[in-house]
Image (tube, rainbow, N blue to C red):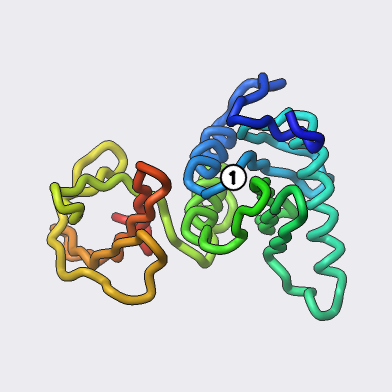
């Protein structure tokens, strides 16, 4: 284990509390963000509500409390008064801190050298799920994680929404404004709703996102 409590080799330390719906959401986020080692939901007092990842629980709690303070301090500065996010790359770790309603914050701990960019959809989808679970007001950024079944070429065929299959018609592929390894399609559901679907590749896995909630 490294000096800042993050286990090496992807070994996960024993939890010191039972998993909640929040930890399930945070675990999904850690899998979606390249280089993520841990994530925590922290309240306005610096207390960790829940966490996930390959790190010592105490180290996660201390780190989350520290970066919660950094976010507060940044927002007291006139130039950053409206800041909703802090991203930092340091010698040994990188960190993402996102403000949530009611004084809560999401803290993501990344491995050394990991980029703090390119995670907007994963973070937005996580914040959307945290918002639903906590009963907060829905965020403005509505990217949501979605279960998509594709054909052999990777084109989406259907969506899985609340346990039900929704077949889609592909209207066209998006060819610009995408990151490396990303693919996107504009689709229409039988209801007439049109949705942009984006597939991000992380290693051998592909994660899908929709630009709006699917009805």
> In the rendering, at what x and y percent does residue 22 appear?
58, 36
Q: Which residue is mark 1?
A: 36
> In the rendering, at what x and y percent does residue 111 appear?
65, 46
Q: Is residue 82 left or right of residue 168?
A: right
Quarter of the rendering containing residue 200: bottom left
The vertical placement of 115 against 62, above or below, is below
Q: Nearer the viewer, residue 3 or 178?
A: 3
Q: Residues within 10 Å of mark 1 (few under 14, many from 20)?
A: many
Q: In which quadrant will I find the N terminus?
A: top right
The vertical placement of 12 against 213, above or below, is above
Quarter of the rendering containing residue 58: top right
Q: Is residue 163 left or right of residue 178?
A: left
The vertical placement of 135 against 198, above or below, is above
Q: Is residue 29 left or right of residue 208?
A: right
**Residue at horizontal 64 percent and vertical 47 percent from the top:** 110
**Residue at horizontal 70 percent and vertical 53 percent from the top:** 95
**Residue at horizontal 68 percent and vertical 66 percent from the top:** 84
Q: Nearer the viewer, residue 213 or 67?
A: 67
Q: In which quadrant will I find the C terminus?
A: bottom left
**How many marks are shown on the rendered structure?**
1
> In the rendering, at what x and y percent does residue 119 appear?
52, 58
Task: Determine the secondary structure under disc 1.
Answer: strand
**Residue at horizontal 31 percent and vertical 40 percent from the top:** 162
Residue lying farthest bottom? Answer: 79
């Amino acid at each position: 284990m490294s000096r800042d409590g993050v286990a090496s080799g992807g070994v996960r330390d024993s939890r010191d509390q039972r998993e909640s719906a929040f930890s399930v959401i945070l675990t999904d986020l850690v899998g979606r963000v390249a280089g993520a080692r841990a994530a925590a939901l922290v309240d306005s007092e610096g207390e960790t509500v829940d966490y996930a990842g390959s790190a010592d629980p105490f180290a996660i709690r201390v780190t989350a409390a520290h970066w919660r303070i950094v976010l507060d301090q940044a927002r007291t500065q006139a130039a950053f008064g409206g800041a909703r996010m802090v991203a930092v790359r340091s010698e040994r770790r990188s960190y993402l801190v996102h403000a949530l309603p009611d004084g809560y914050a999401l803290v993501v701990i990344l491995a050394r050298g990991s980029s703090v960019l390119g995670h907007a959809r994963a973070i937005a989808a996580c914040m959307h799920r945290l918002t639903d679970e906590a009963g907060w007001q829905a965020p403005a950024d509505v990217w949501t994680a979605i279960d998509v079944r594709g054909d052999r070429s990777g084109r989406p065929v259907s969506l899985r929404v609340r346990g039900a299959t929704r077949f889609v018609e592909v209207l066209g592929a998006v060819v610009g404004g995408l990151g490396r390894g990303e693919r996107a399609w504009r689709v229409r559901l039988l209801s007439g709703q049109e949705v942009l679907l984006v597939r991000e590749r992380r290693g051998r896995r592909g994660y899908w996102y929709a630009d709006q909630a699917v009805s």
